[in-house]
Amino acid sequence: MKRFIGLTGIAFAIAVCKLTVAQPVSIPMAQALIDSCFQVADRAKAGQLTQWQEIQPCVEALELELNERERISVLTNMGLVQSYFGDFDAAQSSFDGALSLSNSYPDTYLNRGNLFYLQRNFEAAVQDYNEALRVASKSLDILYLNRGMAYQNLGEFGLAEADFRTALSVRPGWTLVLEKLETLELERNSGAVGR
């Protein structure tokens, strides 16, 4: 799973998947579509997409008989691209589709939580970050950072601080989290609520 920090400071995850079962189409073709979908999502996170049609490899990959893990990866990456283009309804549909296949992929919860965060639905974001933390075994620093930012925006400064400090315990010296703690303290002292 590749991760990146978006302009808003929330971290996203790009699903990486290698084809593992035989398909009715050639395995190289199927793998090429899955890889292309990953590359589109990777370019979206870098702000390098210019046309909506660039999502086509993801659409074509979903037309194949993919196994569960592959389908979840493609849907998750497709949701990231849809988010990039501001099609939040389609992105949520993609993330929901991935989660309907399995609720044990923390990156899908993380990304749907980020979608809710971008829509300023911080309660739903916290719920998805909680689910991601429930099933995650790695990248806990990112999950605690994102959930802390959602708590901060809800005015739950104590919970935000606890999550930021936990993120720092997992990833000591992380500058972004140290900055978030400073901002949190300023907001706490001024009575302001999040950004």
Image (cartoon, grey):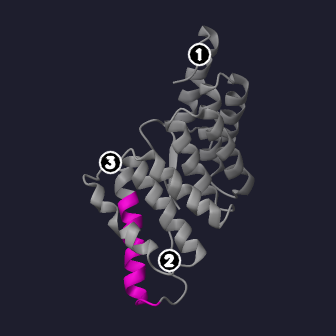
Look at the image and say whether residue 4 sits in the magenta stretch: no
Residue 118 spot, x, y in % from top left? 49, 37
Of the two numbered discs 2 and 1 on the same chain, state the one appearing first in sequence.
Answer: 2
Horizontally, is 35 left or right of 157 in the view? left
Seen from the viewer's position, the closer of residues 125 and 60 is 60
From the top left corner, tell me how far across and down residue 172 is, in percent.
Answer: 63, 41
Dot 3 amino acid type: Gly
- Label 2, residues with CA under 10 Å away: few <14, some 14-19, many ≥20: few
Label 2 sits on residue: 18
- For the record, the magenta segment spans 24-41
What is the secondary structure assignment of the residue under circle 1?
Answer: helix
Task: Tell me what residue is drawn at x 69 percent, y 62 percent.
Answer: 104
- Quadrant in the rendering for residue 167: top right
169 and 80: which one is in front?
A: 80
Label 1 amino acid?
A: Glu
Q: Position of residue 180 (x, y in %)?
A: 56, 28
- Which dot marks residue 187? 1
> Which residue corresponds to mark 3?
47
Q: Callout 3: 10 Å neighbours few (<14), some, many (20+)?
A: few
Q: Quadrant of residue 170?
A: top right
In the displayed structure, 151 sits above or below 56; it is: above
Distance from the alpha carbon under mark 2 to that under mark 1: 45 Å
Marks 3 & 2, CB-CB < 8 Å contact: no
**For residue 29: magenta?**
yes
Horizontally, residue 90 falls left or right of residue 158, namely: left
